[in-house]
Image (spheres, rainbow, N blue to C red):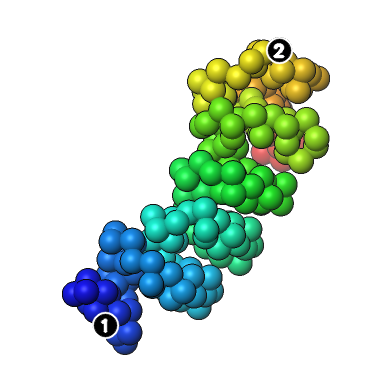
């Protein structure tokens, strides 16, 4: 009873740090009677980021399955701070439930590339999630390049899915090897730098010959 009373008083406080402490306490003790308040804070764009972060963590601790949509809402909110969206993705992946994986898959096609990688790595961390990730790529709901990403590939290999090597080869057929795009970009930039350096040297010679 004392914990419920203390948490209620902290959450009702006008002092920001007290509110955040109350949110964390509610999550640590899994106080289900505070879930409505936590949902309000988590989804409130005007709330301090620290309070929202604590509320997301608390909701995941109390019942990630029940609050999957709340976490998914923050993940898919383009106006939310990136750190909160990333945290939501990690919490959903950590829960490893069909509902939380569903929210990850729903957000996957629309979030920025960095978040896509985080989501893909989170899904790949379990056999069921890895299977759903491959299905998403197969049906065009996720980029096949994610399967080559260095943050995703090791988790896929640990998933022990049947025929994984063959399936990955099929899904990534026609794509350049991982890292080749960056190598090509660096090569083009180096070539451009050397050309500009050569042009500058030629220009200096012309100036010396005709103007000096």
Q: Residue 142 at x, y = what percent?
A: 73, 38
Q: Nearer the viewer, residue 46 or 201?
A: 46
Which is nearer the eye, 159 or 32?
A: 32
Q: Secondary structure at mark 1?
A: helix
Looking at the image, residue 143 sits to the left or right of residue 60; the answer is right
Q: Position of residue 114 (x, y in %)?
A: 59, 44
- The reply to whether discs 1 and 2 touch (Cβ–Cβ < 8 Å) is no
Residue tagged by mark 1? 9
Task: Give the residue number, with chain letter if any, for mark 2.
Answer: 166
Q: Is residue 99 above or below residue 138?
A: below
| Quadrant assignment, res 197 | top right
Q: Where residue 4 sits in the image (x, y, percent)?
A: 26, 74
Image coordinates for residue 21, horizontal then vertical, percent: 27, 70
| Image quadrant containing the N terminus | bottom left
- Residue at point 56%, 28% (across, down): 127
Tell me if mark 1 has few (under 14), some (14-19) or many (20+) residues whose alpha carbon lies within 10 angstroms of its own.
few
35, above or below 151, in the image = below
């Amino acid at each position: 009873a004392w914990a419920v009373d203390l948490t209620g008083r902290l959450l009702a406080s006008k002092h920001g740090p007290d509110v955040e402490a109350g949110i964390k306490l509610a999550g640590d003790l899994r106080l289900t009677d505070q879930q409505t308040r936590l949902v309000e804070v988590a989804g409130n764009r005007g709330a301090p980021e620290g309070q929202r972060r604590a509320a997301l963590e608390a909701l995941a601790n109390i019942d990630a399955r029940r609050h999957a949509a709340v976490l998914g809402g923050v993940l898919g909110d383009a106006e939310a701070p990136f750190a909160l969206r990333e945290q939501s993705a990690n919490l959903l992946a950590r829960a490893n439930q069909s509902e939380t994986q569903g929210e990850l898959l729903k957000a996957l096609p629309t979030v920025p590339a960095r978040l896509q990688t985080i989501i893909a790595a989170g899904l790949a961390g379990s056999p069921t999630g890895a299977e759903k990730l491959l299905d998403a790529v197969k049906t065009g709901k996720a980029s096949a390049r994610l399967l080559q990403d260095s943050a995703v590939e090791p988790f896929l290999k640990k998933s022990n899915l049947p025929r994984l090597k063959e399936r990955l080869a099929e899904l990534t057929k026609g794509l350049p090897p991982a890292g080749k795009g960056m190598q090509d970009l660096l090569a083009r930039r180096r070539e451009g730098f050397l050309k500009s350096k050569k042009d500058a040297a030629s220009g200096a010679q012309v100036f010396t010959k005709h103007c000096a």
